[in-house]
Amino acid sequence: MLHTAAPIAEHHATVDDPVIVTEKLSKTFSTGGTQQHVLKNLDLTVERGSFTVIMGPSGAGKSTLLYALSGMDRPSLGRVTVDDVDISGFSEDRLARFRRDHCGFVFQQIYLLDALSVMDNVMAVGLLTSRDKAAVRTRADELFDLVGLSAQDRRKFPSMLSGGEAQRVGIVRGLINNPAVLFADEPTGQLNSEYGRLVLDLLSRVHESGQTIVMVTHDVKSAARGERIVYLRDGSIAGDLDLRSHSVDDGERTRAAVGFLAGLGW
Amino acid sequence: MGLLIKRDLRKRPGQAISMLLLALIAGVLANVGLLLATDYAHNLAAKQAAWNAPQAVVLVGHLPGWETVVSDLTRDSAVRQVEAQPGWLARVTLAYGGNDLSTLAFVYDADSPVDLGRRTITSRTEVPLDRPVWVPAAFGASGNYALGDPITLTTATGAVRFHIQAFVEDTYTGTPGFGLLAFGLPGKGFADFTDSSFAPATMVKVAAADIPAATDAIGRATKQSFPVASYWDLNGDLLTAGAAMSAGIFSTVLIAFALVIVAVAVVIMRFLLRTALAEDITIIGVLRACGHTTGGIIASLAATFALVTVVGSAVGVALSYVALPTVARVLTAQSGVTWQVIFAPVTMLGIVGALTGVVGLLAAASGAALRRLPTAVALRGGGAPHTYRSSQLPLATTRLPLAPALGVKAALQQWRQSLVLVLTIAMVTFAAVFSLGMTSSLLGSPDATIRLLVGELEDVDVTVHAGVDAHQLATRLASVPGVTTAFPTSAAGVSVRGTNMIMLVTDDPSVWRDDPVYEGRLPRHDNEVVLAAPVASRLGLRIGDTWQGDVGSGEVPFLVTGLASGARGMGQFGVLTGAGYLRLDAGFHYETVALYVTGDRDAVITDIKSRFGDDVTTVTDVRASVLVELSSYLSAVPILGATVAGFTVVVVLLGVGLVVATMVVRSRRQFGVQKALGFTHREIARQVRWAAVPSVALGALVGAVVGALTLAPLIRALLSGIGIMKVNVVPELAQVVGVSVAVISLAWLVTWFVARRLRGISAYALVTE
Ligand SMILES: Nc1ncnc2c1ncn2[C@@H]1O[C@H](COP(=O)(O)OP(=O)(O)OP(=O)(O)O)[C@@H](O)[C@H]1O
Ligand SMILES: [Mg+2]
C-alpha cells in the first residue's frame, strides 16, 4: 500500500510545495541622487512544477523581479527564499554558485557565446556543476534531441544559426543543469511568430515533464501557455490569475487571460 | 578629422599611453645607440684633427746612436712632420680605481711647447701644490683621483710622489688599458726631476699621410740605424679602435635592443590598430554611409597613432640626453678622451621620422583591408569577429578542466592576439637572457673575465736583474710555497712591416693553463708561430702559411700553426717558442719569470721579494694590474645590463597588459553572460589567465632557448673586433630558467591585475543594458 500511496502523497506535496518565496521584496535604484522604487514589498510564492507568467506594462519591474528571484541581483529590502534557503544576503560568488546549481536562463537576446560551438555553449554551463563529461554530454544530446537540433547543428557556431535555432540552443543551455526553476525573460521577443510558437511549444513540453518555469512576456498568447499570470504595475502585484481551471485546448485560457488583462487596463 | 582624433584618444587612453611609452623607449635607445655609433666616433676623429694628432708614436731609449732615429724620420719623404719630446721612462706601479696598476710611465716637460699631438687641459687647480703633476683625464674619470690629490709612482727602487695640478687629455698617452701613461711636470719640476729608476727616453711623434705610412717610416728608421729595438710604439689606429671598441659594443647592444623594442612596438601597434579598426567598424560604416571616404577615416586613425608616436619618440630622444652624460663618463674613462655630448637635432628628427613612418605604414596597411569592406557589411559590424569556424578542444572531449579549457580555446581562436604575445615575450626574453648572460660572463668572476678577454695570463711576473739567468731563477722560484709553476717568459714588442705586435715567448707554451688557440695548435718547434686573429687577417695569413718575422735583423720565415684568441695589445700579438724567437733575435734572453700561484698572491709576492731581493727587480701581481686595465671596459657592462633589464620589464608589462586588457574589453559581453550563467569572478579570471599565460610561456621558452643558443656566437661577434675568438660562454641554466620564470611571473601578475577589471562586469548590467 505504501508503494502506491507514495506518488500520490508526492503529487499532493508538489501542489503547495513552494520553490521560491519572497517576503516584502523591495528593489530601489538610485540614479543621480533620485531614488526609484522599482519593486515594492512584494510577497510572491512560486510553486514547484508551476508555469508562472509575469506581465505588466513596460518599466513595471518585471525583469527586475525576475532577476531578483533568480539570484542575478540582490533585493534592497526583504527576502528571497529558494528551496528554503535565503539567498538575499549571498555574496556575488555565492549567488553565482547558486545560479549555476538552481537556475536556468533563457534570454530575449539569447546571448550564446560566439566563440564556442553550439555543443560547447551547452557543455560550458553543464561542466560548471558536474565533472562527469560523458554524463553532461549525454544529457546535452537528450536535450538537443528534445528541441530538434541535429548532430550537425550541434557542431555549428552561433553565427551560423537562425534566431529560432539559437533560442532552442538557449533553452537546452538553460536546462542542462536540471535547474529548480527555468527563468525566461521574453524568450520569443526577438523571434518571428513561427519560431516564437516553436519555442513556446518547447517550453510547454518541458513544463509538462515537471519543470518549474517563470516567464516574462508581453504577449497574451504566450501568457496563455502558463498556469498563472502575475500582473505587475509600478512594482506591485496588481493582479494574480490562476489559469489551471481553464482548459488549454479550446482557447479557454486565452480568453480568460484576455479578460483578466482587460480588467487591469492592459 | 580632428574630432575623430580627439575621440580616438579619449576612447583609448590606455592604448595611447602604451604607444607613447613604447615610442619613448625606442626613442631613448635609438638616440643613445645612434649617437654612440656616429657622434662618438666623430668626436674622436675631430679631436685628433684639432690636436694635430700624430699617426704613430715611438718611445726611444737613449742607447748609443738613438738620435739617428729622429734624423732618419725627419729625412723620410713619407713623413710630414716629426716632433721629439725628451723625457724619462720607467715601469711603475700606482693606485688606480682601488687597485694597483702596473704601467710604463713617461715623464715630460709640461711647459715645453708641443705642436704635433697637442694636449688639452680638461681641468686644473690654481692652488699651490708641492711637486705638481699633470695626469691623464682618465685618472679623474675612473682612477678615483681629484685635483690636488697626491699620487705615488712606485718604481723598482723607491717611490716618486706628486700632487695633481691638472687633468689633460690627448689621443695617445691617456688610456690606462694601453700600457703607457704620460705625466707632465710644470715649472721647474721637469728640470729638477731625477730618479734612479727612470731612464732618459724620447717620445718621437710622427705625422704622415696615414697610419701605415707613419709606422712604415718608423720601421725603416729603427731598422737601419738602430739595431736594438728598444722602443715602445703606440699605434694611433689601434688606440682609436680600442676606444671605439667599447663604444661599439655599447652602441651595438643598445641599437639591437632598440630594434627589438621597435619590433615589439610594431607588433603591438599593429595589434592596437587592428583592434581599433575592428571596434570602430560600425562607426566607420555609419560615417561612410554619411558620405565620408574610407581614406579620410583611416587617415584620422593613422594620424592619431602617428601623433602619439611623434610625441613619444621626441620625448624619448629628449630624455636620452639625461642618460647620455653617464654613458659619456664611462666612455671617457675608457678612452681617456672626453666626449662632450652635443644635441643632435638631425639624429632626433631621423629617429622620430623613422618611427612615425613605420607607424604610418602600419596604419595604411591595416586600412587597406578596411577599404575593401562594403559599407553595408561595415554597418553590421563587419562580421569579422563572429566568423568562428572550427572548434579546437571540444569541451566534451578535452582533458583540461573547464576554465583552462575555455582560456586555451580563446587563445587558439584569437591566434593573432596570442601570436602578438608569443612574439613580444620571445623578443624580450631573448634580450634579457642575452644581456644577463653577457653581463655575467664578462663580470661573473675576475678569472672568467680575464680568460675571456685576455686569454692566457700568469698570476705573478718576476723581472730578473741584469746578468741573472732566468731559467735558473725559475727553478728556484718553483720551490717557493704557493708557487705551482714557474717558467721564463717574454712579451716583447716586435715590428712587422711597420706594424707592431706583442710577441709572447716561452720555451714550451704547452705549460700554459689556458690555450689561446682557437684553430690549429700552439707552436712546438723553433720554426712555428701562432698569430692572433686580427694579425692573421691583416696579413692575409692562414694556418699552413708562412709568416715573415722581422725585428730589425732581417726576415725569418715561420710556419703558422694556429690562430689565437685574446685582446692582448688590442689583438695584435703572436706566440713563439724561446728557440723560435732566438732565430729572430740572436741576442734574446728572458728577463721575466712567470708564476702560477695558489692562495694568497700578496703573501707569495712578499715572500719572493724578501728571499730573492738580490736577483729580482720587480714582482708584479699581473692579474690585479690587468683587472685595473679592464675595469673601465667592464664598468659599462652593468649599466648595459640594467638598462636592458629595465626595458624588458616595461615591455613585458606593456605588451601583456595591453593584449590582456584588450581581450577583457573585447570579451566584456561574453564574460557578462558567463557571470549570469553562474561563472564566478575567480573562474573567469582564471580563464583569462589561461588565455594569456600559455602564450607567454611559449614566448618565454622560445626566447630563452634562442637566447641561450645564440649567447656565445653573439658575444663572439661583439668581441671579435679586438681579437677575441674563443668565447667559451656557457649560458647558465639557472639564469635562463630564472629569466623565463621572472617573465612568466610578471606576465601572470599583469594578467591578474588586469583581470581585476572583470569585477566591474556584472551579470545584471548585461541583462538590463
Ligand atoms: N540598474 C538599474 N539602475 C537604475 N534603474 C534601473 C536599473 N534597472 C532597472 N531600472 C529601472 O527600473 C525600472 C524597471 O525596469 P525593468 O527592466 O524591470 O522593467 P520591465 O518591466 O522589465 O520593462 P520592459 O517591459 O520594458 O522590459 C525601469 O524604470 C528602469 O529604468
Ligand atoms: Mg524587461
Image (cartoon, coloured by chain):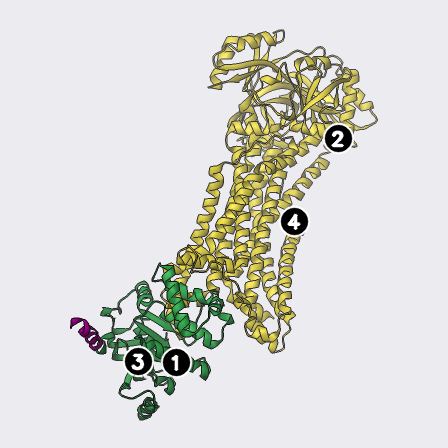
Dot 2: element: helix
Marked residue nearer the N-terminal end (1 or 3): 3
Q: Is residue B766 visible?
A: no
Nearer to us: label 2 or label 3: 3
Q: Tell which chain the image draws in yellow.
A: B
Mark 2 burial class by Cα count in 10 Å: few <14, some 14-19, many 20+: many
Q: Chain of mark 3?
A: A
Chain assignment, label 2: B
Is A149 displayed left or right of B540 in the figure?
left
Q: Is residue B218 left or right of residue B759?
A: right
Amino acid at circle 3: Thr
> Given contact means CB atoms under 8 Å apart, are the residues at marks 2 and 3 in contact?
no
Rendered image quadrant of residue B58: top right
Write down the residue under mark 4.
B344
Label 4 marks which chain's residue?
Answer: B
- Quadrant where the C terminus of chain B sits is bottom left
Under mark 1, the amino acid is Leu
Q: Amino acid at mark 4?
A: Ala
Rendering coords of residue B741 (x, y %): 45, 45
Q: Amino acid at mark 2?
A: Ile
What range of the chain is rendered magenta? Answer: A1-13
Could you tell me which chain the residue with mark 1 belongs to? A
First in sequence: mark 4 vs mark 2: 2
Badge 4, how many Cα within 10 Å: few under 14, some, many 20+?
few
In the picture, which quadrant includes the N terminus of chain B? Answer: bottom right
